[in-house]
Image (cartoon, rainbow, N blue to C red):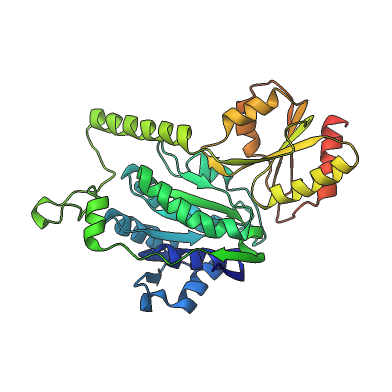
Amino acid sequence: MEEVKLMKGNEAIAHAAIRYGVDGYFGYPITPQSEVLETLAELRPWETTGMVVLQAESELAAINMVYGGAATGKAVMTSSSSPGVSLKQEGISYLAASELPALIVNVMRGGPGLGTIQPSQSDYFQATKGGGHGDYHLIVLAPATVQEMTDFVALGFDLAFKYRNPAMILADGVVGQMMEKVVLPPQRKRRTEEEIRQQCPWAACGKGDRKTRNVVTSLELDSAKMELNNLRFQETYRRIEENEVRYQEYFTDDAEYLIVAFGSVARICLKAIEDAREKGIKIGLIRPITLWPFPTKRIAELAAKVKGILTVELNAGQMIEDVRLAVEGAVPVHHFGRMGGIVPNPTEVIDALNDKFNI
């Protein structure tokens, strides 16, 4: 029988982590994602599943605890919001360079700097372009519902372990704070030490013998070997791009104009499109679910069928760059966005379409 509960997106992350069988959560409170840690503290999973839950002394400490746990093959995660994720970037780069699976949750707030505690989508560049240093990518999942906040914990971990690459759930503050009904997944058992050694032979303890343990590091002083490392990373990224692109489409079959939006903004745009279609205006929507890998090919295909594209984002215009790269000038691409924590309504979206394309 399905277990259905009403909860916030942040709370759903915590419940999903326990039910996935996560080994450890290391975090630090920051609005608007503090309920992740608060919910875990309330549920006390260390007494039921054995999951470690630790409030670290800082964001830097939290991400390096994740690095240590991931190096042993454990399923470990952290969560934060925009300025906190900025502090974690060095550790995230280390995770990527060491080919370690881990899950990072970013519930975005407005910036730059400390900014506002209100919702934003202005960490798109940070997440999809690699906010740390080096030629690396994160697998980036953008939930639009509380149910997806739940489901993407398992998906994020599964992809992270499949490709030995960190994954990020990039949610805006609206999704983190809003409440919806959620179908909770069944409880999984945490893996035994023997199962971890079998599944993760690359881990520090993977060989099970102190004398022959693996060395997990992101450091390589030989330039030729470092280039080979990077070439291996790039091959992994190509496989991810080939196999893991995810998106949803609405009303694209006969659309004359296309909106591209992710997260909570996609839901606002869908309502705008429904209203516009009642007036005979044919607009479609594509919602990228994976922001990296980005649905470049599908957007290019849709661009060949429409007169123009509008990206709608809670930022000054970031995803629009990837849309323009996909379209390659085939049709005009414009941006509409709000900043500072202001969330547009459907009427504003339609007004933006009228302003940009005179429809």
Going by the image, does 130 lie left or right of 72?
Answer: right
x 70%, y 56%: residue: 341
**Which residue is at the front of the view, 151 or 355?**
151
x 20%, y 53%: residue: 206
Query: x, y percentage for residue 342?
Result: 74, 55
Going by the image, does 352 lie left or right of 93?
Answer: right
Residue 283 shows up from this direction:
yes
Give the quadrant of residue 138: top left
Outermost residue to the front? 1
**Which residue is at the front of the view, 278 or 28?**
278
Q: Which quadrant of the figure contains the C terminus?
A: top right
* In the rendered image, the vertical position of residue 274 relative to residue 87, given as above or below: above
Going by the image, does 193 lie left or right of 58?
Answer: left
Going by the image, does 24 lie left or right of 327?
Answer: left
Residue 33 shows up from this direction:
no
Give the quadrant of residue 284: top right
**Which residue is at the front of the view, 205 or 79?**
205
x 59%, y 63%: residue: 9
Give the quadrant of residue 323: top right
